[in-house]
Image (tube, grey):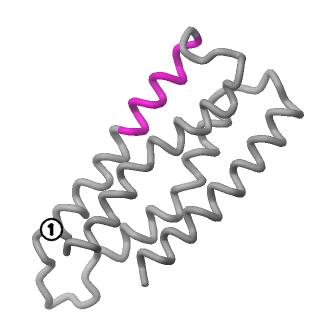
Amino acid sequence: MVILVSVLAGAIGMLVTYATMTLGAAAHAGRDPHWYWVLGLVGLMPAWLIAFVSLLPTTTDGRVPLLSAAAWILSPAAGLIGVIATETVIREPARVTHDGSARRCWVLGAVAVGPAWVIAILGHVVG
C-alpha cells in the first residue's frame, strides 16, 4: 500500500511541477535555472518522504530488519549525493544551454531525488 501511495504522489507531483515548469518557462524566459531544478526536486520529494518515513518501525520494541535499516540510511545519502551532483551541473553555465534549459534543469532536479526514492521503495520490497 505504501508503494502505491508513494508512486501516486510521485506521479501527481511530477505532473504538477511539469505544468508549472512549462508555464513558468513560457512566461519567464530569463529565470534562474535553479528555479526549474527545485521544481524537479519538489516533484518527487513527497513520494520519497512517504516511502522513507514508512521504513521506520511502527513499534519501539521491534527490531528493524537489516535491509530496511540499510535502505533507511542509504536513501538520504543517495539523495544528498544526487542534489550535490546535479546542482554542480546547474551551477556551470556552459552546461546549461538556453535551448530547453528549463526542461533539462527540471529533469536534473527529479534525477537528484530519483535514486533516493528507488532505494526507499526497494527497502519496502526487500525488507
Give the total of numbered labels.
1
Q: Is residue 60 above or below residue 96?
A: below
The residue depicted at 39 percent of the width and 69 percent of the height is 51
Identify residue for label 1: 67
The residue depicted at 25 percent of the width and 82 percent of the height is 57
State left or right for residue 94 relative to residue 29. Answer: left
State left or right for residue 81 relative to residue 83. Answer: left
Place residue 121 in its image quadrant. Answer: bottom left
Residue 15 at x, y = what percent?
Answer: 68, 57
Magenta segment, which residues? 82-93
**Main SS category, magenta section:** helix
Q: Furthest-top residue in view?
A: 94
Mark 1, other Cα within 10 Å: few <14 / some 14–19 / many ≥20? some
Magenta stretch: includes residue 123: no
Q: Is residue 68 above or below residue 25?
A: below
Residue 110 at x, y = what percent?
Answer: 52, 45
Viewport quadrant of the N terminus: bottom left
Residue nearest the observer in this picture, 67 or 4:
4
Magenta stretch: includes residue 90: yes
The residue depicted at 47 percent of the width and 77 percent of the height is 4
Tag 1: residue type? Answer: Leu
The residue depicted at 69 percent of the width and 30 percent of the height is 102
Residue nearest the observer in this picture, 81 or 102:
102
- Secondary element under disc 1, as helix, strand or loop, is helix
State left or right for residue 34 relative to residue 74. Answer: right
Viewport quadrant of the C terminus: bottom left
Residue 93 at x, y = what percent?
Answer: 58, 12
